[in-house]
Amino acid sequence: MKPTITIEYCPRCGWLLRAAYMAQELLTTFNEDLGGVLLRPSETGGRYTIFLDEKVLYDRKEQGHFPEIKELKRMVRDVVHPGMSLGHVDAH
């Protein structure tokens, strides 16, 4: 069974578009490795947390900022497809 990414975002903060962009990028990059990406509006204000199945992969409050898409792709790759080349994302 392929893992699922869940992006929990604060709708009051206007973060739906950011979450949708990240979902699109992850689905494009990992189209054969993910079971899907779920966007979940949070009932907690200011929340932006990314889960891989039930495990927290990234929490904006803990990190103090939003993840860069290349950083997020690396984190997902390291779990769902270790050794996969991310092309220019791996160049840095």
Image (cartoon, rainbow, N blue to C red):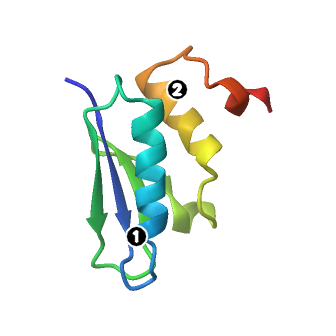
Going from N to C along the chain, the mark reached first, 1 or 2, is: 1
When the figure is inspected, residue 25 is found, relative to residue 41, above or below; the finding is above
Q: Residue at x 33, y 79 (%)?
A: 44
- Residue lying furthest top: 83
Apparent side of residue 54 relative to residue 78 in the rendered image (left or right)? left
Q: Residue at x 51, y 17 (%)?
A: 82
| Location of mark 1 (residue) | 16
State the image coordinates of residue 49 (x, y, percent, origin top left). 42, 60
State the image coordinates of residue 92 (x, y, percent, origin top left). 80, 33
User: Toward the viewer: 59 or 24?
Assistant: 24
Helix, strand or loop at mark 1: helix
Helix, strand or loop at mark 2: helix
Label 1 and label 2: CA atoms lie apart by 25 Å
Which quadrant: the N terminus?
A: top left
Residue 11: image quadrant is bottom left
When the figure is inspected, residue 22 is found, relative to residue 40, above or below; the finding is above
User: Toward the viewer: 32 or 56?
Assistant: 32
| Location of mark 2 (residue) | 78
Mark 2 residue type: Asp
